[in-house]
Image (cartoon, grey):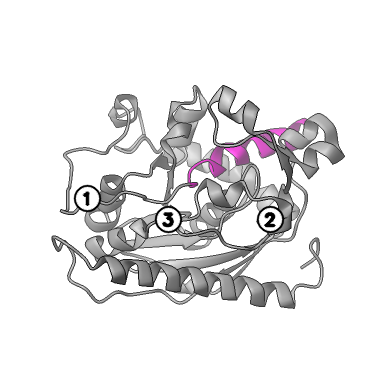
Amino acid sequence: MPKRVAAIAAAEAIEQVASSDLVHVPSTPRSPARPVVEDDATIRHGDVDEWGRSENMRRIARQLYEPIYSKWFRAEWEGLEKIPTDGGALIVANHAGAIPSDAPAIMHGIEKELERPVYGMADYFFRKVPVVGTMWSRLGGLPAHPDNAYRLLREQKQLVLVFPEGTKGTSKHMSERYQLARFGRGGFVEIAMRAGVPVIPIAVVGAEESMPIVAKVPAVAKAIGIPYMPITANMLALGPLGLVGYFPAKFKLRVLDPVYFNVEPDRERYSKSRIMDESERIRDNIQAALYDMLRERRSIWFG
C-alpha cells in the first residue's frame, strides 16, 4: 500500500500541470527575454531548463506513474500517430475529475510513446502552493500565460498541453459527465495562429469516473482560497484514502485530426469571429468524439 500511495501522490503532482485555458492573448506578438515564471524557476539547477523542468524528475515521475497508467487505468490510445514527432503543436483535451487524472495520462503516454517532452499550462494558483509549486515546475508545468505558450511553440518547437475548460471542467458534478464546458474565449486558437502551429484535439474517456464529484462546499473553497472544494465518491467509498486514491476506470484516449489554420503567423491581429468559430468547432469535434466513444464503451471499468 505505501508504494501505491506514493505512486498516486506522484500522479497528483503531475496532473497539476494543465488545468487552465490561455484566457488573455495580447493584440501584438510578444517574445519576452525569459519565461513568465518565478525567479527560482529561471535559475538553472543541474538539469533544470529555463522553464523549471527537470528531466531527472520527469524520469522518476514516469517510473512511479507507469504502474498507474498501464495497470490501474490501463490506458489505450487511438490515433497517437497524429501527434507530430517534431515541431511545435498545441494539444487540447477535455478535462475532468476533482483531482484531474487526464493530464498525467496524456503527458505520460506521449512522452513514453513518442519520446517528446510535453509542457503543461495551468492556473497560476498552483505555482504559489509551497512545495507543490516547485514540483509542478520540475515536472513540466508553467503558468498559462500566452507569452510562455508562444515561446514554447514558436521559438522552441515544443508540445504544449492546455485544457480550455479550465476549472469549469474539473469542478463538474458527476451528473454532468462528458458534457464539455465552454472553451473560454478561444485564446488557445489565437496562440496557435500566432505561433504558426496546429491544434491537436484529444478526447479522453475514463477520467470523469476516476474521481467524480458528488457535492461541493463553496464556503470552504472561498475561505481557503481555492477554485472549488469537492466531496467525491472516492472520499465516501474509501475514507481518507479517497483524498488521493483514484477509482480504476478504464482510460481511452482518441487523438483527432490536427487542425491547421492556414494564416500567417505573428500577425498584429486575427479575426475574433474566426477565433471563436474555430474554438467552437474544435470543442464540437471533441464532444462528438466523446459521445462516439461512450456509445462504444461497454463498461466503465473494462472499456
Q: Identify the residue at horizontal 29%, vertical 31% (top origin).
A: 42
Q: Secondary structure at mark 1?
A: loop
**Horizontal and vertical percent position of residue 24:** 31, 49
Question: How would you rate the neighbour count of disc 3 (Cα within 10 Å): few for under 14, some for 14-19, many for 20 or more?
Answer: many
Q: Determine which residue is flagged by label 3.
A: 184
Location of residue 143 (image quadrant): top left
Describe residue 273's horizontal placement relative to residue 161 as left or right: left
Is residue 262 among what the camera can see?
Answer: yes
Q: Amino acid at mark 1?
A: Pro
Q: Identify the residue at horizontal 35%, vertical 30% (top origin).
A: 46
For the residues labelled 1 and 3, say whether their Cβ atoms are less than 8 Å apart. no
Q: Amino acid at mark 2?
A: Glu
Q: Identify the residue at horizontal 35%, vertical 63% (top origin).
A: 89
**First in sequence: mark 1 or mark 3?**
1
Of badges 2 and 1, nearer the viewer stands 1
**Horizontal and vertical percent position of residue 224:** 57, 23
Q: Determine which residue is flagged by label 1.
A: 26
Q: Which mark is residue 208?
A: 2
Q: Which mark is residue 210?
A: none
- Distance from label 2 to label 1 (Cα)? 33 Å
Is residue 84 among what the camera can see?
Answer: no
Of badges 2 and 3, nearer the viewer stands 3
**Horizontal and vertical percent position of residue 169:** 57, 52
Identify whether 198 is placed above or below 222. below
- Region rendered in magenta: 1-19
**First in sequence: mark 2 or mark 1?**
1
Name the image quarter holding the N terminus: top right
Question: How would you rate the neighbour count of disc 1 (Cα within 10 Å): few for under 14, some for 14-19, many for 20 or more?
Answer: few
Residue 302: in magenta span: no
Q: Secondary structure at mark 2?
A: helix
**First in sequence: mark 2 or mark 3?**
3
- Distance from label 1 to label 3 (Cα)? 15 Å
